[in-house]
Image (tube, rainbow, N blue to C red):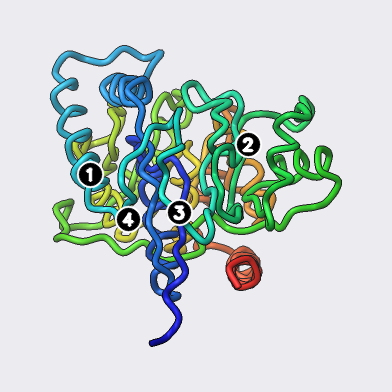
Amino acid sequence: MGNPKPRMGILTFHRCINYGSYWQARCLVEELRSRGHEAVILDHDAWRIKRAEWTCALRPVLPTSVPSMDYLLYGLKLLKFLRAISKLPRSPRFSLEHASNLESFDRVIVGSDEVWNLRHPWYGGCPLFFGAGIGARLVSYGASFGNYDASQGLEPAWADRLRRFEAISVRDDNSRAIIQNALGFEPELVLDPCLQFMPRPEGIWRGPDRPFVAVYGHNFSEAFGRNVRRWARSHGYPMVSLGYRNDWADQQWITAGPQDFAHAMARAEAVATNFFHGCIFALRHAKPFVSERSPYRSTKIENLMAMIGGEKRLVSENSTATTYDVCLSELLDSRILDRVDRLRRQSNEFLDRALD
């Protein structure tokens, strides 16, 4: 008999009603399984988290009000997420607050996502994501502190927990600075799983049968909507808003599930977004894209653009129409693609070492 497959548990925000959270969890677990590991997502559960996630899923565009007709549509989207999450390879369910009944693993990989964001509205400060109560060897892949700024430092109690990790990698410079300042070494910088690996959705394409612009995000500025609409109409492309209502778009595909989203991002002619994973999926499929800064996600998006040399694709309310035209019309610069390829090799080498 050969040696048994190493048992790997992935600890992430897999229950979030969010396209990026779903796909980064799925991409990572599928990659580990392709490497011959017995990998599952650690299926933590807590009623307070469910309540927060489902409430947010039904009112996702706050502070903008939700039209009454949209509640049913967001509810259908929620059900599609729950169905997709239920099909992920998962461990037996356990309590987020009491992980004592967590089964044994050879290693637990924490990440990707904002797993260390101490300011996250409902996961912030959860000790489990810092390794508390986990007896297995600990590794992080693409972990992030989200919008918790490096200037705030990290309290010794959190730093002490992170010292148990055998290998630490992060997905942005803000997180790298926090680790370096708190632990005294520079962690590896790796790509988000959705950019490192290829998302492979199931099912048939249910969207437009002609070229379109994918709009992903919400609460865009008036200038952003006006400029994207002007460009799209000049090229005869309808604008499809994925997962959220944006009235300036031509089609509101609020009920798009995780599979629909991945199909759409692969098929779009261009992407207009203010979400981190809007940029990630556009990069993964080498699509022209333009991204607007948003307060909650500015750190993640700006760090990503700096990492791959894509700063010119970030716009503000003062950006010119020409800037939008260039971002949405021009293919990605070869230097951006070269940087992504180099980071992909670097990320793969980290996984090789960390899981050896």
- Going by the numbered disc 4, the residue's amino acid type is Ala
Q: Is residue 252 visible?
A: no
Q: Is residue 189 above or below residue 18?
A: below
Residue 268's label in the rendered image is: 4
Q: Is residue 306 above or below residue 242?
A: below
Residue 145 tag number = 2
Q: Which residue is painted at 44% across and 64% down in the image?
A: 7
Q: Earlier in the sequence, mark 2 or mark 4?
A: 2
What is the three-letter code of the residue carrying label 1? Gly
Identify the residue at image location x=46%, y=46%. 277
Q: How busy is the neighbourhood of tag 1: few (under 14 within 10 Å), some, or many (20 plus)? A: many
The secondary element bearing badge 2 is classed as: loop
Q: Position of residue 20 (x, y in %)?
A: 41, 45
Q: Residue 73, image x and y in percent?
A: 16, 28
Question: Spatial distance from mark 2 to mark 3, Cα to Cα?
Answer: 27 Å
Please tell me the numbered disc located at residue 220.
Answer: none
Quadrant location, the C terminus: bottom right
Instruction: Indicate the secondary structure of the residue bearing disc 1.
Output: loop
3 or 1: tag closer to the N-terminus: 3
Secondary structure type for disc 4 = loop
Q: Pick the residue in front: 276 or 113.
A: 113
Q: Amino acid at mark 2?
A: Phe
Crowd class of label 3 (few under 14; some 14 to 19; many from 20; radius 10 Å): few
Q: Can residue 276 be spotted in the picture?
A: yes
Nearer-N-terminus badge (1/2): 2
Drawn side of residue 329 relative to residue 316, left or right: left
The residue at which mark 3 appears reads as: 104
